[in-house]
Image: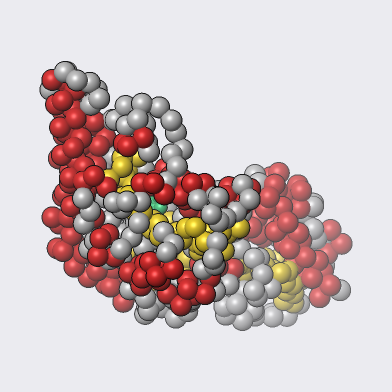
Amino acid sequence: MSAQPIYLDYAATTPVDARVAALMAECLTAGDAFGNPSSAHPFGAAAAARVEHARAQVAVLLGADPAEIVFTSGATESNNLAVLGCARAAADRGRHVVSSRTEHKSVLDPCRQLGREGFSVTYLTPARDGRIGAAALAAALRRDTVLVSLMYANNETGVLEDVGALAAVCRERGVPLHSDCAQAAGKVALDVHALQLDFASLTAHKLYGPKGVGALYVRHGARALLQPLNFGGGQERALRPGTLPTHQIAGLGLACELAGAALAEESARLTALRERLWRGLAVLPGVHLNGAPAARVPGILNVSFEGVEGESLVAGLAGLALSTGAACSSDSPDPSYVLRALGRDTQLAQASLRLSLGRFTTAAEVDRALASVTAEVSRLRALSPAGAAAGGGWGDGPGTRLVSGEGGGPGRDTWVRFELLTSGDTVKEARFRVFGCPHTTDVVAWLCGQLRGRQRNALLPGAPAAWAAARAVPVEKLGRLLVVEDALRACLLHWA
Ligand SMILES: *Cc1c(COP(=O)(O)O)cnc(C)c1O
């Protein structure tokens, strides 16, 4: 395994294209483009020309007119501006908004804020394939609905929504539609006019541009539907005032142009790599493709594994830089809300991997990733109490007896079994099977070492709190050690 992990997290962010970085540098230093684009002198005019060139490049990628592009700091800001800006501007006419449970947090959190401001929000639940569909949307619209916000491509599953059909429903009912297109722009053909979107968000760093810049498409005539979040110098039609960051915007523009030029070829190449990965994983039993059979963006593959604990799976894949539904890697204590909304149970949502491929992903990397995931899933399944039956290999010799005990169980977040080879009142050997987080596994393995030579009347080597201290187990995982203790106590019960 090479020192640097294989990068399979292009849906989280992408490296900046070298041509984009060079252009950005050109705009930063003393030269012809460092001026304030708002200034009336030639320095300002040169910077403004760069900005307007970039505006046209972004517009081409989206199928929009340049005048419909508002530069922002990224998709989070674009989503906030569209959701809060549109709802607040319409508050006198109605206070109902429709979105979905699988949106990015940068749509869900503004929606929650609207709730605090007296709006009611309907969060649609997608079908098992991850899509909402026009019928569900039509049923959710009310006379007081002032905004619908539904994403084009989901960032976890890659599922593509039929936004054209959603837009048709919205148009018929006279409700504006915003779509978070951060994962779609530059990945799939996008034509906001043909799709009849009112607002669309994108961000540069998902398409080989810099972090910290993005855009909101605002349909001609839809400017009046928006209230700004910030107030200042009137830039960007007063929707997003502030001195325009020429280098960021120029970088976004070129990144859009390059993504558009490479789109057909890249999408075919990445689709083939993604299918290669899936075909390899599908050989394993108990593997689920999340978002199937919906159409998905080329570069994202999201899979769940039965019989494997998510945190342990990720811990065993240190050679791969990827994202997971396991709670350990995110800010939230719950496994992926997106996969839960698709009807996956907690275990499958936990034991999920999002492998996202991009420009520098090779077939050799895909094959190495495939081999790592296959080996790790097999290893964890073999270690699980659900695996082979107890007793193998040790045999009950004369004078020895096999004693086992379990804690937790199938369907729980922890399942532990100790197997003790005893002679009279003494533990001769101890071994274990475990389904659990890496901390649980570590403590169980360590305890097996402690158990050897112990007497029945003093079997438990201290209490869970002491084990936690000895093995540096974080406090939120303490409950799992109680399950470990249960397994030891069950051994005692059977030994009696
Ligand atoms: C990355 C992403 C965002 C946030 O974009 P930033 O530019 O990082 O703020 C929003 N929505 C989706 C779907 C994304 O993938």
| Image mark count | 0
Where residue 238 sits: x, y (%)? 36, 35
233 lies above or below 203: above
Residue at screen point 18% across, 68% down: 268
Q: Pick the quarter of the image with the N terminus.
A: bottom left
Q: Pick the quarter of the image with the C terminus.
A: bottom right
Residue at screen point 27% across, 59% down: 192
Q: Is residue 105 left or right of residue 414?
A: left
Q: Is residue 352 left or right of residue 238?
A: right
Where residue 24 sits: x, y (%)? 20, 32
> Which colouring convention does the figure follow?
secondary structure
The image quadrant of residue 401 is bottom right
The image quadrant of residue 410 is bottom right
Residue at screen point 66% across, 65% down: 414
**In the image shown, does 290 or 411 lie closer to the viewer?**
290
Q: Is residue 367 visible?
A: no
Q: Is residue 476 visible?
A: yes
Where residue 52 sits: x, y (%)? 18, 37
13 lies above or below 242: below
**In the image shown, does 21 or 72 lie closer to the viewer?**
72
**In the image shown, does 494 or 106 lie closer to the viewer?**
106
Where residue 443 sits: x, y (%)? 65, 55
Residue at screen point 18% across, 27% down: 47
